Image (cartoon, rainbow, N blue to C red):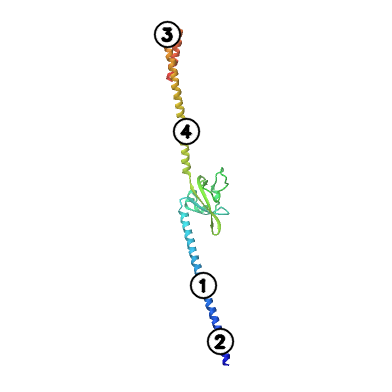
Amino acid sequence: LSRELESKKRRLAIANDFLEERVARRTAELKETNAMLRRDITHRKKAEKALADSQMRFKNVFETAAAGMAIIEGQTRTVVEINRAGARMTLYERNQLTGRCIDEWITVPEETEFHQIPVPTRHPIECLLTTCEGDGIPILASTQNTILNDQPHWIISFVNIQKIKEAEAIQRELELRSRRAQHLESIGTLAGGIAHDFNNILFGIMGFTELSLEEAEPGSTQAKNLNEILKGGYRAKEM
């Protein structure tokens, strides 16, 4: 009986050691899992904070930008949001543009290769913005793709270039006037040269006429003809 009891005690001790080992191993695994979860939570919180900070910076830039900016839904090309500068340029209220297709109020010139604003643009392109009053404003626009709420969107930014266009028109007019002035100056120079040559020829004609008149018989037909030549010469000289 004593040996049987000792055997049971040994088996019980072995089982107890085995259970303690398993508990220790499982506890270590749980601690490692818990540490990994804490790290994942920390990283996720940092990522969420970084995303929130990025969204806040974009929101600040979007709202305070001097250029017009709008967020466009990728499939329908409708306005999701437009900033204050963009709405001010169109003379619409911001909520009046939300949900409208951008192609209704920003169009590309007919002479370009595009039928509508391309996305993305390789470089800024000239477009025409139609205000709520029906006036057309020339703008320079650029677009780029983005993802919003896991859906494709794009952002368009645009600036009013009407004053630049007006300055270019004035510059072209000044250049045209300059070319006209240069043309008139060239004509004047040519006319001056012709007049100088004409006066030289006329001087010879009048000089020889006067010499011939001195040798002609007064009152003769020759004298009368020479006087007419001399009168014509004086008239030509006055011209």
Marking on residue 32: 1
Which one is closest to the eye, mark 1 or mark 2?
Answer: 2
Q: CA distance from mark 3 to mark 2?
A: 170 Å
Report the residue that reaches farthest toward the bottom: 1
Q: Nearer the viewer, residue 41 or 35?
A: 35
* Residue type highlighted by circle 4: Arg
Name the residue that disc number 3 marks. Answer: 215
Mark 2, secondary structure of its residue: helix
* Residue type highlighted by circle 1: Glu
* Residue type highlighted by circle 2: Arg
Name the residue that disc number 4 marks. Answer: 179
Q: CA distance from mark 3 to mark 1?
A: 138 Å
Which one is closest to the eye, mark 2 or mark 4?
Answer: 2
**189 versus 36 height, above or below:** above
CB atoms at circles 2 and 4 under 8 Å apart?
A: no
Provide residue 155's location: percent of width, then percent of height.
52, 53
Q: CA distance from mark 2 to mark 4?
A: 117 Å
Q: CA distance from mark 1 to mark 2?
A: 33 Å
Marking on residue 180: none
